[in-house]
Amino acid sequence: MTCAERKDLLLLYAFDQLEPDEARPLLAHVRGGCPRCTGELAAARTIAGQMGLAVPAVAPSSGVRARVLAATASPRVRSRWIPAAGAALLAASVTAVAILVPAQRGVHALRQELAAARVVSMAGTGPQPRAAARIFWDEGRGIWHVYLANMKPADPGRTYQLWFITPDQAKVSAGTFDVGREGAGEITVRVPPSLGKIAMAAVTEEPAGGVPQPTGAIQLAGKLET
Amino acid sequence: MDSVPQSGDDDFALMEAIARRDQGALASLYDRHSGTVLGTCLRILRDRGEAEEVAGDVFIELWDRASRYDPGRGHPLAYLLNLARSRAIDRLRSQGRRARMFVEPDPREPAACDDPLGDSMTAQMRGHLDRALADLAPGQKRALELAYFDGLSHSEIASTLGEPLGTVKTRIRQGLIRMRETLDAMYGEGAAS
């Protein structure tokens, strides 16, 4: 079975319309790390959730909110991004260099790298709910291979920019990239050793050439640390 | 990427904050999406009291599971609504209740709100879905609604509609594919505008 054939099955699975014996091999394939099918499953789940919008919203009684807050009462922690100035300071001290995938690299070598890599997913957000990406993180060499799918081409004069986001919400550019007419793209970036922990990855659309700090809406996001 | 979550795009930031046990973020997400969650639960359960109980449980479960939420698995609102549907159908089945056939909204049911707690992103997603559903053949739409909102199996839908099992399976499959194509085309329009 090809990934193109799995696309429809993933949609049926997201809507609970597959029998268990149909779903098992499909999930095994996705868990095996196929970036295309992972993206398709995320897109299918978004459609399934969106189906819940087919009925009107209904305002709950005030007692529901009170019950939820009473059941989840716990000390509050800070939730804001750190000030932009602090992030800019960190960005100035750390340079993330985007590098091209060397054309001469053998397919076998690349497969070996990907097989050993830690895998992180990014999902499309509001502007591009169908977009998806897979990050193959070669922690030994400090390199991310990022493969993107289902993306709109950036508007004229603009480009996509990948960001490392640290646990304290500092945002560090990982480089810019564009996608092809079919919405697929890839970028290989070196993770700055001085960056420390990375909590999230995000993609924004920015003016061509990129910007020191993000100004556009998040197009994709993925969580790295648990 | 502003410092304060303001739009649907920032549901991701709220989920991240909830995973760090920020109850204020949970309250913000609740204020933004509780009407949508309750609408889904009410459509499935058709009982205001039960629907409110399940909707509240959904947000409590979200709080408990937030650290395991993976943004790569889909948009937070979709995650929330999938969880709401799953829990409401679980409730329906645990009570041994037979899901009811789709009927037009009962005028005696509580009035729907005009989504005052929603945001522009939710409104856009709702508009796109409405158009996608309107584009389906009536038989496809009905079969999909019975599967999604009433949790019926293919066999139960076939029995309910008095149609062959194969016809029901085909309608659901083709309906979902059609819906995806329509949504993809609309997001494509958005890209061009």
Image: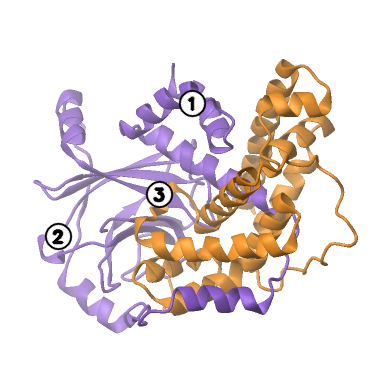
Q: What's the residue type where badge 1 is placed?
A: Pro
Helix, strand or loop for disc 3: helix
Question: Based on the displayed image, in which of its 4 quarters is residue B99 positioned?
Answer: top right
Q: How many numbered circles are shown?
A: 3
Question: Based on the displayed image, in which of its 4 quarters is residue B56 positioned?
Answer: bottom right
Q: Which mark is residue A138?
A: none
Chain of the residue where label 3 is placed in the rendered structure: B
Q: In the rendered picture, chain B carries what hue?
A: orange
- Neighbours of disc 3 within 10 Å: few (<14), some (14-19), many (20+): many
Vertical arrangement, residue B166 with respect to residue A148, above or below? above
On the same chain: label 3 and label 2?
Answer: no
Residue A121 percent across, percent down from the top left: 35, 47
Chain of the residue where label 2 is placed in the rendered structure: A
Q: Which mark is residue B72?
A: 3
Of the image marks 1 and 2, the number of the one nearer the N terminus: 1
- Neighbours of disc 2 within 10 Å: few (<14), some (14-19), many (20+): some
Query: Which tag is nearer the camera, tag 1 or tag 2?
Result: 1
Residue under label 1? A20
Residue under label 2? A192
Measure the alpha-carbon separation of dots 1 and 2: 44 Å
